[in-house]
Image (spheres, rainbow, N blue to C red):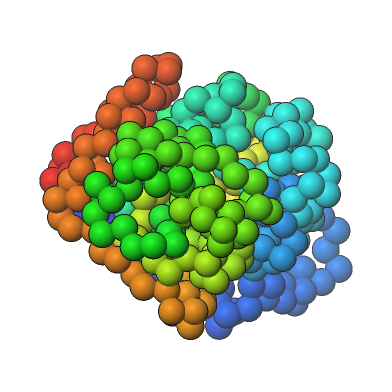
């Protein structure tokens, strides 16, 4: 029943999203000037992000979000974008949005782990989300977004919405025919990804990104677990011949967070509009932009001769059991983590995982 609610919700919101973006779906920065000509913004917000200026999440996705906000609010809210590091270092994004130094931020939940462990449970738990539909259902129908909003509120932050990421994949120099083949391999993986690799028998390393390409080429590193587009951006297809399917982390949410004082200052009509824009943006990211990002990276991998290796059903069962062991460990961190893991486990059980 609830799954049906999410499906209907997504379908209806997709219609609304298409009504907003319409023929502009291919143009992230569509022109909103007609609707907002001469309009002085009531609210001017600075928005920071972990994404660099040449990252499509900044140049395409967030540019699109800012344009959606401008058009939907008829210019009453204006979002000014700042790429990674231009206002604060990435690790200071939480304190910047908490204090109001910036009014809005595009952030990864795990950045908040020091003060809010559930941020890592949201973003970096292996095999918690497998598709964008899973993410929307867990967030909107199963109460995960409401739970996260409670946790973020304690940090003086309002969680507006989330972008759907393409996920993180294992890319290796040599073929890994099975999960058992990971044993002893030196895999660049950090945080919970590193813990996950260690539980599967690999030796996780924290090789600097700038040294990773050469490390794989020279054989001091055997592969890496990184974002799909990130693998392409780092040109790992030049030194890695294989990518394992399925991905280890899929359709993770990348949060759009608003300083709570800035959010509370909005009149109710603008809050309602922003909520609708937030949902539309989330659906657009998963239905329109994510497939384009994946297609572009896949083309680069195929052109370089990368082979995609599918793990067997029995290997996928091992991945799922190992992932859930990690979930259980994080569930002990605090009450928010426990509740989030309960949501994941109930949903996984319904889907035979």
When the figure is inspected, residue 163 is found, relative to residue 234, above or below; the finding is above
Q: Is residue 270 visible?
A: no
8 vs 257, left or right, is left
Closest to the observer, 157 or 185:
185
Tell me the residue at 51%/55% (across/down): 219
Report x, y in % for residue 129.
Answer: 34, 48
Quadrant of the image occupied by residue 75: bottom right
Count numbered badges in the picture. 0
Q: Can residue 195 be seen in this view?
A: yes
Tell me the residue at 59%/21% (across/down): 115
Report x, y in % for residue 146.
Answer: 43, 34
Give the quadrant of the C terminus.
top left
180 vs 236, left or right, is left
Tell me the residue at 34%/69% (across/down): 308
Tell me the residue at 26%/36% (across/down): 322
Report x, y in % for residue 123.
Answer: 47, 41
């Amino acid at each position: 029943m609830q799954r049906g609610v999410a499906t209907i919700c997504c379908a209806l919101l997709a219609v609304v999203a298409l009504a907003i973006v319409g023929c502009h779906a291919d143009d992230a920065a569509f022109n909103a000037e007609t609707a907002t000509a001469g309009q002085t913004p009531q609210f001017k917000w600075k928005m920071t992000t972990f994404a660099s200026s040449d990252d499509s999440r900044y140049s395409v996705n967030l540019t699109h979000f800012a344009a959606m906000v401008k058009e939907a609010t008829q210019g009453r809210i204006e979002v000014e974008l700042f790429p990674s590091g231009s206002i604060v270092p990435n690790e200071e994004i939480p304190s910047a949005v908490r204090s109001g130094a910036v009014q809005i931020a595009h952030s990864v939940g795990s950045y908040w782990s020091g003060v809010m462990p559930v941020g890592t449970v949201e973003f970096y738990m292996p095999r918690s989300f497998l598709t964008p539909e899973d993410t929307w259902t867990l967030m909107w129908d199963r109460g995960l977004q409401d739970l996260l909003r409670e946790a973020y509120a304690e940090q003086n932050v309002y969680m507006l919405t989330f972008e759907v990421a393409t996920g993180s994949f294992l890319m290796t120099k040599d073929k890994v025919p099975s999960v058992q083949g990971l044993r002893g391999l030196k895999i660049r993986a950090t945080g919970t990804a590193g813990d996950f690799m260690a539980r599967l028998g690999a030796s996780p390393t924290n090789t600097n990104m700038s040294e990773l390409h050469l490390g794989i080429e020279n054989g001091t590193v055997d592969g890496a677990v990184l974002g799909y587009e990130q693998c392409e951006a780092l040109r790992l297809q030049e030194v890695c011949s294989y990518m394992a399917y399925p991905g280890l982390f899929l359709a993770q949410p990348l949060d759009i967070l608003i300083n709570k004082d800035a959010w509370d200052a909005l009149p109710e009509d603008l809050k309602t509009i922003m909520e609708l824009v937030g949902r539309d943006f989330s659906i657009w990211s998963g239905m329109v932009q994510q497939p384009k990002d994946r297609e572009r990276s896949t083309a680069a991998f195929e052109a370089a001769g990368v082979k995609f290796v599918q793990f067997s059903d029995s290997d996928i069962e091992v991945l799922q059991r190992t992932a859930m062991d990690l979930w259980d460990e994080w569930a002990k961190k605090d009450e928010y983590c426990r509740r989030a893991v309960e949501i994941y486990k109930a949903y996984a059980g319904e889907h035979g995982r």
